[in-house]
Amino acid sequence: MDFQTIIDLVNVTASFDSRPILNGVTLKVAKGEAVVIEGATGAGKTTLIRLLLGALPVQSGYAHVLNTDLLRADRDALTQLRRRIGVVFQQPRFLDQENVVTNVSVPLAILGNSRRRCRSEGERALMDTRLASSSRKRPFQLSGGEQARLQIARALIHKPYLLLADEPFAHLDPDSAADAENLLEAAHLRGATVIITTHRPTRLAEHARKLRLEGGTLV
């Protein structure tokens, strides 16, 4: 598939726990674009990421992500959508009973790749993110900065059409945040379409379209 318009939202509204969060959000993102969405805590940034991932229902408006109509998509269509997206969560989520190389290759396993290819591609991804020496460790044995790099490597290993990063620097020290910025910037330079939410300034904004989420609306 060759998507030219990755995200197309028009006057989208959405709620969480019966509380209105997004109000009339309009956003169009082209293939290969980088967008940084800033906003205070509670502005709705995580809600927007969940909506783009198809994990939160759209109440009204026009909402297409990778040519998938979020208002009408069934469970199978949403599953296929998520397989074309890479996600970096604010709080890292790993399979703690599995080692690092298994964790980084999870998206490839979900797509049906062989165990041999998953291990090979996983080890390559760990080498690219300076985690090769930790491949046999469990995720909880890594530092916060290493977990951030592992999460980004996992989000990119299957070469997704779209990368969503929700507050990827929120809990990192300056050096670890800089490492995470470098990985996300490199992914964008390789052609990935990247959406990043953040409540603090980031160097990535210099190379991206910058928006702000206020009162559930993008400005």
Image: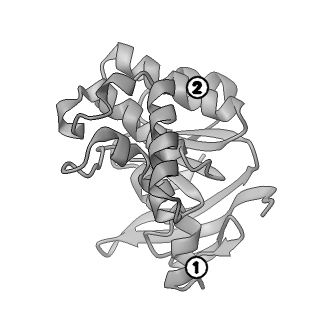
Near-viewer residue (217 or 166): 166
Q: Residue at x 66, y 53 (%)?
A: 161
The x, y position of residue 203, in whole percent, is 55, 20
Label 1 crowd bin: few (<14), some (14–19), many (20+), radius 10 Å: some
Q: Is residue 148 above or below residue 8?
A: above
* Element type at mark 2: helix
* Left or right of residue 39, residue 212 in this image: right
Q: Which mark is residue 204?
A: 2
**Which circle's residue, 1 or 2, is located before the other in the chain?**
1
Residue kind at label 1, given as amino acid type: Ala
The x, y position of residue 110, in whole percent, is 46, 64
Q: Residue at x 49, y 83 (%)?
A: 75
Residue kind at label 2, given as amino acid type: Leu
Near-viewer residue (141 or 124): 124
* Left or right of residue 91, residue 66 in this image: right
* Element type at mark 1: helix
Q: Is residue 67 above or below residue 89?
A: below
The x, y position of residue 199, in whole percent, is 41, 34
Q: Residue at x 46, y 59 (%)?
A: 109
Can you identify the residue that label 1 sits on?
Answer: 77
